[in-house]
Amino acid sequence: MCRPDHFTVSYRINPWMRPDQPTDNALALRQWSNLHAAYRDLGFDVRLIDPLPGLPDMVYAANGGTVVDGIALTARFRYAERAAEGPAYAAWFRAAGLAVHEADAVNEGEGDLLLVGDTIYAGSGFRTDPAAHAEAARVLGREVVGLRLVDPRYYHLDTAFAVLDPAGGPGSVAYLPAAFDDASQEELRFRFPDAVIVSEEDAAVLGLNCFSDGHTVVHAPQAEKFAADLAERGFGTVGVDTGELRRGGGGIKCCTLELREAP
Ligand code: ARG
C-alpha cells in the first residue's frame, strides 16, 4: 500500500476525476488508514511504499505492477502523468528481493491483470495494451484470458471484475456484464457460470473494486446489494469507506497490490 500523503486530483485521465473540485487530503488519509487497519485486523502482512511528491495517483498501488511467484512484472503507464510510478514501484520490488522484469508493453499492473486460480484475466480497451497480455503470459508463466472493457467509467478491469476466491472455481468472481464487449461477456459466462452478477448501482460506487482472501471481502459499504449477496454465499464482509479516493477513480482494490511469493 502507499499512503495518500500527496493525493489530489490535479489532472483528468478517467471520467471520475474532476480537477476543478478540491479534494480533502485529511479525509483521504483517514479512510486509507481505516483500510490499512482493516487489513492488519484480518492478519495480513501489509508492506508500504513511500509516496512521492508530484505523483498523486501513487496511492493506487494495484497499478504498480503484477507479482506472481515472486516475479514482478513492472507497470508501464498509458499516461505521462503516472509514468514515473513505474520505476518507483520497480525499485521497491528490487529492494524487496523480487525478480523484476521490466515491461515492454503498456500495462497498469493489477488494475488490469488479475489472477484467478492459475489463469490471469487481463483487461484492455482503455489502459493496458493487448500486447501486454502475451508478455504477462510469458513472464509470469500463466494462461492469460483477455477481456475487453467498453465503458470509460470502468477503464481498469478491477473496477468491473472482482476476484472473490483466488483459488478459482465457477463462482470465484463477481462482475458487471455491461462493462465488457459481447465476446468477453460470453467468455465470462463460460468460465464463471456461478459468478456474482453485480448491479449498475453497486458498480457505480466502485463496489467491484474490493479485496478478498477467499474468505473475507473488504468492500465499499455503499455497495449494499453486493454485500448482501456476498454474505449469502458465506463470505465474511468488512465495509470500509474510501469514498474520497473514489474521486481519483479508485477504491479498495486500487489501493492494494498483492505480493505473491515464490512457491
Ligand atoms: N486516477 C487513477 C488512474 O486513472 C486511478 C487508478 C485506479 N486504480 C485501479 N487499480 N483501478 O489511473
Image: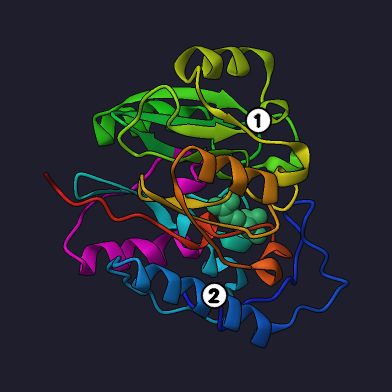
Whether 174 is among the magenta residues is no
* SS type, badge 1: loop
Give the image location of residue 144, x and y in percent. 38, 25
* SS type, badge 2: helix
Residue linked to disc 1: 149
Residue linked to disc 2: 32
Identify the image quadrant of residue 86. bottom left
Q: Which residue is drawn at 45% across and 30% down?
A: 121
Q: Can residue 1 be seen in this view?
A: no
Residue lying farthest to the right in this orientation: 20
Please name whichever residue, 92 or 156, is drawn nearer the observer in this view of the structure: 156
Q: In which quarter of the image is the C terminus?
A: top left
186 lies above or below 197: above
Give the image location of residue 222, x and y in percent. 70, 57
Please name whichever residue, 204 or 61, is drawn nearer the observer in this view of the structure: 204
Q: What is the three-letter code of the residue carrying label 2?
A: Trp
Residue lying farthest to the bottom in this orientation: 26
245 lies above or below 121: below
Give the magenta range. Answer: 84-113
Q: How far apart are marks 2 and 1 (CA)?
A: 27 Å
Q: Which residue is drawn at 54% across and 75% down?
A: 32
Which of marks 1 and 2 precedes in the sequence? Answer: 2
Q: Can residue 231 be seen in this view?
A: yes
Identify the image quadrant of residue 18. bottom right
Q: Which of marks 2 and 1 is in front?
A: 2
Give the image location of residue 116, x and y in percent. 37, 33
**10 Å neighbourhood of mark 1: few (<14), some, or many (≥20)?**
many
Q: How is the image coloured?
A: rainbow
- Ligand 1 within 8 Å of disc 1? The answer is no
Q: What is the three-letter code of the residue carrying label 1?
A: Leu
Q: Is residue 235 left or right of residue 195?
A: left
